């Protein structure tokens, strides 16, 4: 207490105990030079290894303390004998400045004793010394108990079980089976469910005294992170945004008819879903159209030659059919079937409808040619009649106005557009004249999508 340091210190209580037995303590005055020499001697005598050199009674120590109280700064005449032999020579402490006991007891509280110490200061020093004496006795008792229990095995030692990952009550039961107690130190955020042990103080197999406490940390639930939206980002940007949230990105590739190759199709978990920090976000990347399938390009408005080349480059075939429409540019593709973006198999046929206004002899007829074939429409040499069909438009189309196209396809006529026009549901039932070619397919398209199909009889 007077130095602020322990007389013996070490990493373990056993080492401290051995120092008590084998080593001499450092004198307090060597640590704090302001300690009166007489007080230093009293402390050292109380700590002597040989019990015969210590104070033999409280009265004896009281007398020494009273002498030091009266003359704390006199180093020469303190009557002490302790420690090692001849370490502290016998000295006499005279009573200075006090003529008789009565006068001493009646002095003013602030009166000065020899060398300037006041009565108040002396009382404080006395109290400190007594407290030190009590602390030394208590420490000795504690050390004795510790050494008896641990060195001589009077307490049963048990092994600590592994309880990480246990629900807290199950963990408590597991410890109690071993004769141990559980103490929850703190509840922490974790990727483990709420109420489960995430950390324990001692490793499995560590030995503790029976009845000791094992400190544990218990999960208070997942620390939530909202998944960011990366569906419209590039792969590199998506990775940055995901990792900024403390998440991990993995990628999967898949075919897609709608999303271009290399773009993100979707993500899992979905946008703004709450997940644990460190969770994985799977980003699905388009590989484009599956092998053997192609997307039909848009060639409307192209010249005939450009349209043919574009269809060839897309690994598709084409058939050419013509219409005569003076309101449209000559030689331009006015429509196609299937529509742009449709996914079809390689080498499927795309019907190209081209406007031919300069053919005066065949003004009212349509013609058809195919990829790699310059033959005329086989139906042009036949004397085929006409027939009328009725088409109910009252339940057609997704919009109020829509495009109607009638296409005829067969061995007699090839493929030809019989009719194109804009209508609405309010038009009700309309009549359309088509070529009478038995065995041919008659297909009705509404806004480019196949609505119905029948075989002419």
Image (cartoon, rainbow, N blue to C red):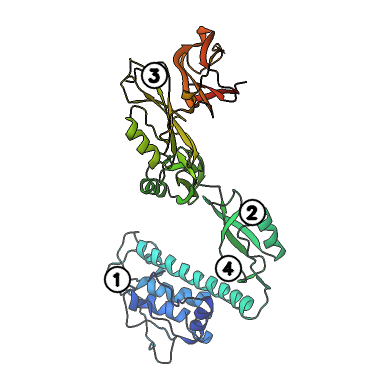
Q: What element carries label 2?
A: helix
The residue at 50%/46% (across/down) is 292
**Disc 2 designates what residue?**
168
Q: State which tag comes first along the sequence, 1 or 4.
A: 1
Q: Position of residue 121 (x, y in %)?
A: 35, 63
Q: Nearer the viewer, residue 155 or 268?
A: 268
Q: Quadrant of the N terminus?
A: bottom left
**Badge 1 local density, few (<14 within 10 Å), some, or many (20+)?**
some
In the picture, residue 436 is in which quadrant? Answer: top right
| Image location of residue 46, percent across then percent down | 47, 79
Q: Residue 362 carries which label?
A: 3
Real-space Cα separation, disc 3 to disc 4, in angstroms: 97 Å
**Dot 3 lies on which element?**
loop
Is residue 357 placed above or below 205 in the rendered structure?
A: above
Q: Residue furthest bottom?
A: 85
Return the residue at label 4. Answer: 203
Query: Which quarter of the rendering shows the C terminus?
Result: top right
Mark nearer the N terminus (1 vs 2): 1
Say which of 180 and 428 sits in front. Answer: 428
Tell me which numbered mark, 3 or 4, is placed earlier along the sequence.
4
Give yes or no for contact between labels 3 and 4 (Cβ–Cβ under 8 Å): no
Q: In this view, does 10 lie to the left or right of 391?
A: left
Would you identify the image quadrant in which residue 120 lies? Answer: bottom left
Residue designated by label 1: 114
Sequence-earlier tag: 4 or 2: 2
């Amino acid at each position: 207490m007077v130095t602020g340091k322990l007389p013996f210190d070490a990493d373990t209580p056993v080492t401290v105990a051995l120092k008590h037995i084998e080593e001499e303590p450092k004198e307090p005055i060597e640590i704090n030079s302001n300690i009166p020499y007489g007080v230093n001697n009293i402390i050292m005598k109380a700590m002597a290894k040989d019990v015969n050199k210590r104070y033999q009674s409280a009265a004896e120590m009281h007398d020494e303390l009273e002498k030091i109280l009266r003359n704390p700064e006199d180093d020469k005449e303190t009557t002490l004998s302790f420690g090692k032999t001849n370490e502290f020579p016998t000295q006499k402490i005279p009573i200075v400045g006090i003529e008789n006991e009565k006068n001493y007891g009646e002095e003013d509280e602030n009166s000065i004793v020899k060398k300037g110490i006041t009565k108040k200061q002396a009382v404080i020093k006395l109290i400190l010394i007594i407290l030190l004496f009590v602390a030394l006795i208590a420490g000795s008792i504690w050390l004795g108990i510790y050494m008896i229990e641990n060195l001589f095995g009077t307490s049963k030692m048990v092994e600590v079980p592994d309880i990480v990952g246990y629900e807290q009550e199950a963990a408590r039961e597991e410890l109690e089976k071993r004769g141990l107690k559980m103490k929850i130190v703190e509840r922490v955020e974790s990727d483990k469910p709420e109420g489960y042990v995430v950390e324990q103080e001692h490793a499995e197999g560590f030995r503790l005294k029976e009845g000791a406490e094992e400190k544990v940390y218990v999960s208070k639930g997942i620390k939530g992170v909202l998944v960011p939206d990366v569906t419209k980002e590039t792969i590199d940007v998506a990775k940055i945004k995901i990792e900024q949230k403390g998440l991990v990105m993995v990628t999967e590739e898949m075919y897609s008819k709608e999303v271009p190759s290399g773009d993100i199709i979707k993500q899992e978990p979905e946008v703004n879903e709450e997940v644990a920090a460190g969770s994985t976000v799977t980003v699905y990347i388009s590989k484009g159209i599956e092998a053997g399938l192609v997307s039909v390009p848009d060639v409307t408005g192209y010249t005939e030659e450009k349209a043919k080349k574009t269809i060839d480059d897309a690994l598709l075939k084409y058939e050419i059919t013509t219409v005569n429409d003076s309101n449209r540019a000559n030689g331009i593709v006015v429509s196609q079937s299937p529509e742009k973006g449709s996914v079809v198999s390689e080498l499927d046929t795309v019907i190209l409808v081209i406007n031919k206004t300069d053919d005066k002899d065949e003004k009212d007829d349509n013609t058809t040619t195919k990829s790699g074939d310059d033959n005329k429409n086989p139906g042009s040499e036949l004397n085929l009649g006409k027939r009328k069909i009725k088409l109910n438009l009252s339940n057609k189309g997704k919009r109020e106005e829509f495009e109607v196209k009638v296409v005829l396809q067969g061995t007699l006529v090839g493929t030809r557009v019989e009719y194109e026009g804009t209508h609405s549901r309010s038009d009700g039932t309309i009549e359309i004249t088509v070529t009478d070619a038995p065995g041919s397919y008659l297909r009705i398209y509404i806004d480019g999508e196949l609505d119905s199909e029948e075989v002419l009889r």
